[in-house]
Image: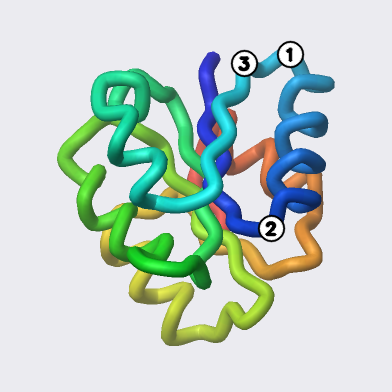
Amino acid sequence: MRVGVIDDDEGMRDSLGALLQAHGLEVCLFGSVEDALAEGDKLFALSALIVDQHLPGLSGLDLIRRVADHDIATVLISAQLDNKLKAEALKAGARAALGKPLDAGLLLAAVNSGRYA
Protein backbone atom coordinates (compact mmCIF):
# COMPACT_ATOMS: atom_id res chain seq x y z
CA MET A 1 0.00 0.00 0.00
CA ARG A 2 1.37 3.41 -0.98
CA VAL A 3 0.53 6.36 1.29
CA GLY A 4 1.19 10.05 0.69
CA VAL A 5 1.92 12.54 3.47
CA ILE A 6 1.51 16.27 2.89
CA ASP A 7 2.74 18.55 5.65
CA ASP A 8 4.84 21.72 5.45
CA ASP A 9 6.51 20.87 8.77
CA GLU A 10 9.48 18.74 7.71
CA GLY A 11 9.81 17.11 11.14
CA MET A 12 6.15 16.08 11.21
CA ARG A 13 6.32 14.87 7.60
CA ASP A 14 9.42 12.77 8.29
CA SER A 15 7.97 11.37 11.55
CA LEU A 16 4.76 10.33 9.83
CA GLY A 17 6.76 8.79 7.00
CA ALA A 18 8.86 6.79 9.47
CA LEU A 19 5.75 5.61 11.35
CA LEU A 20 4.07 4.44 8.16
CA GLN A 21 7.22 2.73 6.87
CA ALA A 22 7.63 0.95 10.21
CA HIS A 23 4.19 -0.56 9.59
CA GLY A 24 5.13 -1.85 6.16
CA LEU A 25 3.67 0.96 4.06
CA GLU A 26 5.36 2.62 1.10
CA VAL A 27 5.47 6.40 1.58
CA CYS A 28 5.59 9.49 -0.64
CA LEU A 29 6.30 12.79 1.13
CA PHE A 30 5.21 16.24 -0.07
CA GLY A 31 5.70 19.70 1.44
CA SER A 32 2.55 21.24 -0.06
CA VAL A 33 -0.65 20.46 -1.92
CA GLU A 34 0.86 22.09 -4.98
CA ASP A 35 3.89 19.77 -4.82
CA ALA A 36 1.57 16.75 -4.64
CA LEU A 37 -0.62 17.97 -7.51
CA ALA A 38 2.48 18.56 -9.64
CA GLU A 39 3.19 14.82 -9.37
CA GLY A 40 -0.10 14.07 -11.16
CA ASP A 41 -0.21 10.33 -11.82
CA LYS A 42 1.94 9.59 -8.76
CA LEU A 43 -0.59 11.38 -6.52
CA PHE A 44 -3.60 9.62 -8.01
CA ALA A 45 -1.90 6.21 -7.73
CA LEU A 46 -1.80 6.48 -3.92
CA SER A 47 -4.02 4.23 -1.82
CA ALA A 48 -4.22 6.75 1.02
CA LEU A 49 -3.28 10.34 1.71
CA ILE A 50 -2.62 12.08 5.02
CA VAL A 51 -2.79 15.86 4.62
CA ASP A 52 -2.37 18.73 7.06
CA GLN A 53 -5.11 21.36 6.92
CA HIS A 54 -2.97 24.45 7.42
CA LEU A 55 -0.50 24.74 4.55
CA PRO A 56 0.81 27.62 2.51
CA GLY A 57 -1.27 27.84 -0.66
CA LEU A 58 -4.03 25.26 -0.99
CA SER A 59 -5.28 23.69 2.25
CA GLY A 60 -5.74 20.06 3.14
CA LEU A 61 -9.50 20.43 2.71
CA ASP A 62 -8.94 21.88 -0.77
CA LEU A 63 -7.02 18.74 -1.72
CA ILE A 64 -9.59 16.39 -0.22
CA ARG A 65 -12.23 18.03 -2.40
CA ARG A 66 -10.00 17.69 -5.49
CA VAL A 67 -9.38 13.96 -5.00
CA ALA A 68 -12.90 13.06 -3.84
CA ASP A 69 -13.72 11.37 -7.17
CA HIS A 70 -10.63 9.17 -6.98
CA ASP A 71 -10.22 6.01 -4.94
CA ILE A 72 -7.85 7.53 -2.37
CA ALA A 73 -8.56 7.22 1.35
CA THR A 74 -7.87 10.67 2.77
CA VAL A 75 -7.12 11.66 6.35
CA LEU A 76 -7.10 15.32 7.37
CA ILE A 77 -4.84 16.26 10.28
CA SER A 78 -4.73 19.59 12.11
CA ALA A 79 -3.43 21.14 15.30
CA GLN A 80 -6.54 23.36 15.27
CA LEU A 81 -9.16 20.71 14.56
CA ASP A 82 -12.64 21.71 15.70
CA ASN A 83 -16.05 20.16 15.11
CA LYS A 84 -16.78 22.42 12.11
CA LEU A 85 -13.55 21.50 10.30
CA LYS A 86 -14.02 17.82 11.16
CA ALA A 87 -17.56 17.87 9.73
CA GLU A 88 -16.40 19.68 6.57
CA ALA A 89 -13.62 17.16 6.01
CA LEU A 90 -15.89 14.14 6.45
CA LYS A 91 -18.55 15.71 4.21
CA ALA A 92 -15.88 16.33 1.54
CA GLY A 93 -15.00 12.64 1.60
CA ALA A 94 -12.21 12.31 4.15
CA ARG A 95 -12.04 8.95 5.87
CA ALA A 96 -11.01 10.69 9.09
CA ALA A 97 -10.15 14.05 10.60
CA LEU A 98 -7.63 13.80 13.44
CA GLY A 99 -6.18 16.39 15.77
CA LYS A 100 -2.50 16.87 16.51
CA PRO A 101 -0.78 15.51 18.44
CA LEU A 102 -1.78 12.40 16.54
CA ASP A 103 -2.78 9.08 18.03
CA ALA A 104 -0.71 6.64 15.95
CA GLY A 105 -3.25 3.84 16.39
CA LEU A 106 -6.15 5.94 15.11
CA LEU A 107 -4.07 7.24 12.22
CA LEU A 108 -3.01 3.76 11.13
CA ALA A 109 -6.57 2.47 11.48
CA ALA A 110 -7.89 5.33 9.35
CA VAL A 111 -5.29 4.70 6.66
CA ASN A 112 -5.90 0.95 6.64
CA SER A 113 -9.67 0.64 7.07
CA GLY A 114 -12.97 2.09 8.22
CA ARG A 115 -13.95 5.64 9.09
CA TYR A 116 -12.71 7.26 12.29
CA ALA A 117 -13.57 10.82 13.30
State whether residue 70 is above or below residue 24.
below
Residue depicted at x 62% and y 63%:
98
State whether residue 84 is above or below residue 23.
below
x, y percentage for residue 2?
52, 18
Q: Amino acid at mark 1?
A: Gly
Residue on which disc 2 sits = 9
Residue on which disc 3 sits = 26
Query: Which quadrant holds residue 80?
Result: bottom right
Point out the frontmost of discs 3 and 1: 3
x, y percentage for residue 84?
43, 86
Relative horizontal placement of residue 72, taking residue 30 as reference (left or right): left
Is disc 2 surrounded by few (<14), some (14 to 19) or many (20+) residues within 10 Å? few
Q: How is the image coloured?
A: rainbow
Real-space Cα separation, disc 3 to disc 1, in angstroms: 7 Å
x, y percentage for residue 24?
73, 13
Q: Closer to the N terminus: mark 3 or mark 2?
A: 2
Point out the frontmost of discs 3 and 2: 2
Query: Which quadrant holds residue 92?
Result: bottom left
48 or 7, nearer to the observer: 7
Q: Amino acid at mark 2?
A: Asp
Residue on which disc 1 sits = 24
Cβ–Cβ under 8 Å for marks 3 and 2: no
Residue 100 - label = none
Is disc 3 surrounded by few (<14), some (14 to 19) or many (20+) residues within 10 Å? some
Q: Secondary structure at mark 1?
A: loop
Q: Quadrant of the N terminus?
A: top right
Q: Amino acid at mark 3?
A: Glu
Q: Secondary structure at mark 2?
A: loop
